Image (cartoon, rainbow, N blue to C red):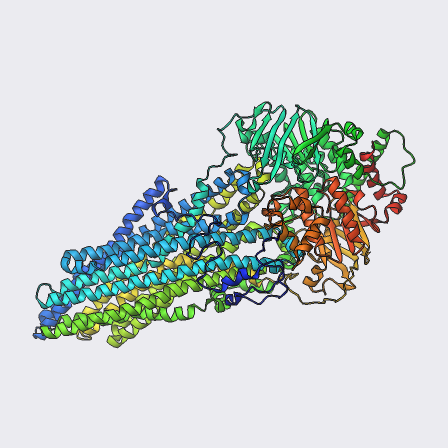
Amino acid sequence: MAPSPPASPPGSSTPMGMDSLEFAPEKSGPPPYTNVDKFDALDKIDELPQDFDTKGKPAADAEPLLAPVPVLKLFRFATKTDNFLNIVGLFCSVASGVITPTMTIIFSSLVQSLITFNALISLGKRQEANAILDHESRKYCLWFLGLGLLQWIVSFGVNACWAVAAENQGLRIRQLFYLSIMRQDIGWFDTVKTGELTTRITNDVNLVQDGIGEKFGFIFMNVVAFLTGFIIALVKAWDLALICMCILPFMIATAAFMGRRIARWMSSAQDKTASSGAVADEVLGGIRTVMSFNGQEYELTRYKERIQEAYLFGKKKGYVLGGGIGLIQFFVFVMYCVGFNYGIWRIYNRVLKPQEVLNVIFALLIGGFALGGSAPHLSAVATAQGSAAKVFDIIDRKSPIDPLDTEAGTKVEKVRGEISFRDVHFSYPSRSDVPVLKGFNLEIQPGQKVALVGESGCGKSTTIGLIERFYDPEQGDVLIDGVNIKELNIGTLRQRIGIVTQEPVLFSTSIMQNIKWGAVDPENSEPTDDEVIEAAKAANAHQFISQLPSGYDTLVGEGGALLSGGQKQRIAIARAIIRNPDVLLLDEATSALDTASERLVQDALDRLSANRTTISIAHRLSTVRNCDQIYVVRDGVVSENGTHDELVMSGGEYAAMVRAQELRQAVRIAEQGTEDDDEEDVDELIAKELREQAIDLKATTTRQTVDSAKNASVSGSVNPDGSELKQIDESGDFYLLWRLIYKFRGSIKAAIPGTIFSVINGAVLPCFTLVYSRLIISLSDTDREQMKSDATRYACLFLIFAVTDLFAMFGRAGLWHIAGESLTRRIRYETFKKYLSFEAGYYDDEENGTGKLTARLATEAEDVNKVVGTVLGTFVSTLSTVTTALVIAFTNSWQLTLIVLCCWPIQAVAQFLQARSVWGSAFRTKRAYERSGQAAAESIRNIRTVATLRREETFIRSFNEHNSGPHSGNLKGAITTSIGFGFSQACNLLVNALLFYSGCRFIINEWITMSQMTGVLFAAVFSSMAIGLLAQFSPMISKGAVASRGIYKTLNRKSLIDSLDSSGSSPEKFEGNVEFKDIKFSYPLRPDTKILKGISFEALTGKSVALVGASGSGKSTSILLAQRLYDASSGSISVEGISVRDWSITSLRDHMAIVGQEPILFNYTIGENIAYGKPGATQLEIEEAAKEANIYTFVRNLPDGFNTNVGQKGGRLSGGQKQRVAIARALVRKPKLLLLDEATAALDSRSEKVVQRVLDKAAKERTTLTVAHRLSTIQDSDMIIVFKAGRIVERGTHDELLAQKGHYSLLVQQQSLQVTH
């Protein structure tokens, strides 16, 4: 059975057809384990992604496409206050929309005064004409002034009310979305991706808020202006208005079609964007694994595919948007043509007066202009409808197991600990066809200590999930204290349960806070610091914590990345201890501990488990030998049970497991008395060993806080290129935005014809006004035949404008939108690529958490997209309008034009101040969304730990605080912005008042003619309106400028270790010789904590070298340095005699393979995960590696075999199954240097024995560096190196070290005593 292909192979070349992306060329390589034909469609602009059929409908096997949310439903989360604001905003929108067409009544009356003036002049009545014009101009200009002030007020109301209400609703939607996520059952999380959810929290909710804010008010304002124009037309000349209304149905149909299509395409585009976010979250969350296997090119290709699919949908939107708006403008000009021709005919027949026709047409003209200006806002609302579909769907989902439901079920105050499994059958929801438990029965008495042992994947950990009610059984019952678990309140039940797992999860906060979060109710009854310290002491964690620079206030990093595996597990144990639970669940609780720590921690767990029900899952049988009852689980049922001695005597499966773990002894301790005496001696030695470790750690660290350490290391780790970043910091945001667009100018080639069309579109309106002014002059001609001939000729010219603007608007709206989508794709790709090039230390900084980086990918490029796709096209068009208008105006009257020029800067300054007011809040909001995205990503990714600790409310509170923080600032910013917006809109009328009055004075003084004045007047009026439209885009510009700074900082940062840089040495012969010479090292974020203090050792070709010692002594760090994930502070690491700094980083890692103690699998099939280790791996090679890792039989028995998806982080597999897949991934690589960091820690005894045999065989053919706490796995190594607090204290073979009776001998004695019986 061939595995299904991954998105693209590691190290493969750019897929066919991707050249059109204009991305930087990538390395070529053989196409591994994939079907390249899958990418052929990416070069076909109009071809839909694979989950759509040829008719544009979702394919049968694709996730159902949710229908866009109806417009009114977008406001379903508005409160009474929000609705009140929306009503006030609606009233202001209507008032503002009415004012502009009302102005046409005044305008037409004033034009009639000019016509009358012209007629009187032709009759030689100059004095009378001057008097009438002077009186009329003063009167109507005062009307303009009054309307301008009123427009200022109502426009302020439009922007302020809608923006404030949208801010409130956006905050509420974001909070409800996250709340709903936290309510969901674990089975639901098995089917979704963390990155997809976090992308929707940031990007999708932002788009929804964008669509229900001031843009919605602008649509009302513009539509009301259009309708008011028709009403005025009906009042002034109903027959002429009805003639014009014949065109209206075509406009409405076009707008409706455009809205539906855009909403549909954007819903699909947001799905793909969320999918790309899921890829980014998964890759960045497992970045060390990606680096280790040189998977960057693979992941780049996978990410590229997702953003390409989103781009295709965005491109479709661009075509529909451009074509729709172009058609609407076409029909508007056709309406003018039809209306004027009919009006001229009615004037010719003396039915209508020129003033009435002008009033009707001018009202429709202003309304049509306003309607055209609403196009970007219509797009925003349609986008919001599509984006809201999935967001609202998740908010509305009712969880079958709701941990936040405080009313459902019987509340649990105390659990006695009687647990029963009665004929339980269970399959995971994500793999319902694979039964895990098949009639499982178990009876545990209160206070009993029970152990579950067996092979990986037999169902042991599943029972813990059922006890915590992560899932419900398909058949049978789980009872606690005789009550069906379904009848208990889930929240209070989990509060009575404590758990420590084999892959402990710590949160990105301090050690103190991590331990406190283990308490039953840390918010209302927070543990004291003394209680935390006591818990840490019981878990053998106090000594190493107290010696850290910041002690208990030390930040542990994302997932506890700044601590060793053993240190993390001890903190997790302290977290369980402080809860004082009624039921204790231990799933490989000590698997990551060194032998010295394990003994004391096991004693602490034994004390903790006293007088309470304890269920232990363990592969290291020495930890469960004292249990009251041991159950052997095999294939989903209990195969045998009894005490340790009973099961050993029976000689069954358990006895075989015990024998497999016995440690060979070459030297026995001569001074042996009783077993108790031996144990006391060892305890004393262990305590001495741990005290020495603490003293040594204290001597090599300072009390500098992590924060100050971070500041001290900025230049060396986080920001290696200080001069570049300083230059960026000193540059303005708008300058950086321009630089960013220029940098990626090759990706916005559609903007070239878009610019040409925008220029044409901008010139159409002034040219139209020129013809329009000539038409007005022709209406004053006393020769009726000549009037009819000239006016009809001018009116028919409108058809030319209709056709011209059809194509011009398509280019302006459509092509610029496509350019914006292309730029978004490019920025996301380049940013993600840059992330993959950074050194591992970059990700240790909490400012670069996975959630924050994923949020940046989602929002920053989208903010720039809005600037390019919407604002730039409008800006070019406006610039063309202004330029053309100035030319027309200057040719008519330079005096009046100078007055116009004096007014426009005032509008420009008002808009700049408006943008500046948005600027600060945009920056604060961006940072807040990053922090909330990080909190959301961390909690969703580790939802099982969150659910176990019952910390849903804690993370909900934290998420809400992150989002509420900038909320008040955003509200103030909305008010300030609204003042500037109102002034910008009022300027149109105020400028008109000044121009009318000045023009009339110039005519009276005989400086200009009426024809010259109308030429300047109409050009200036529509130019001012065009400038005023730009004010509506100020928030977009500010957000885009703020986003560009973040993008530039990322793209300009120079990586200390560029994982994508293939330059350097790449010897043809690689034998596996490694040498560490006087290596000293500190992690970049904790430079004062010395991890390695001058270690030196070498691993020669074909030799196996084991690294042993206490947790945190530097063993795993040495593995990281060998891969050059970090660079040593001093000393040198050589591979094949060449410093790792001189190696080609990709070539160096190609010769290595690693299996870590917490293996990271990706959301691919099992076959793809194994093939991740070797580009081009054949099915035969994949299966052979699976056999060697002892997982082949398990995989073949799955319904989908190697095509079985492992889920996010391998969540659909057990710990042992994940580790075996990771081993197969390493073995398929056939490396010359094999790195094993607790590679068999999560394996059962049987699998460990088989896999260890394979690894031992593999070690003979290659150099092996092994980190292990279970000494039975490394006793045959050619060299064993003992680490202690960052130094090497002993080295030699197993027998040689035992003979020395030193540190290694102490470790052996401890493990030997534990298995002796």
In the image, residue 1134 above or below residue 217: below
Give me the residue at 55% from left, 44% from top: 940
Could you say where residue 24 lies in the image, as x and y percent from the top left?
56, 67
Is any part of residue 137 visible from this angle?
no
- Quadrant containing the C terminus is top right
Extreme residue in the front direction: 1
Q: Tell me which corner region of the image, top left, top right, bottom left or bottom right, holds residue 615.
A: top right
Q: Tell me which corner region of the image, top left, top right, bottom left or bottom right, holds residue 481.
A: top right
In the image, residue 1021 above or below residue 258: below
Give me the residue at 17% from left, 75% from top: 1006
Is any part of residue 501 visible from this angle?
yes
Nearest the camera: 342 or 1006?
342
Extreme residue in the right direction: 670
Instruction: Decide if residue 1105 is on the left or right side of residue 921.
Output: right
Nearest the camera: 866 or 847?
866
Could you say where residue 277 lies in the image, as x and y percent from the top left?
52, 53
Nearest the camera: 142 or 179?
179
In the image, residue 538 above or below residue 321: above
Could you say where residue 990 lies in the image, as x and y percent from the top left?
26, 61
Instruction: Decide if residue 406 is on the left or right side of residue 1214.
Output: left
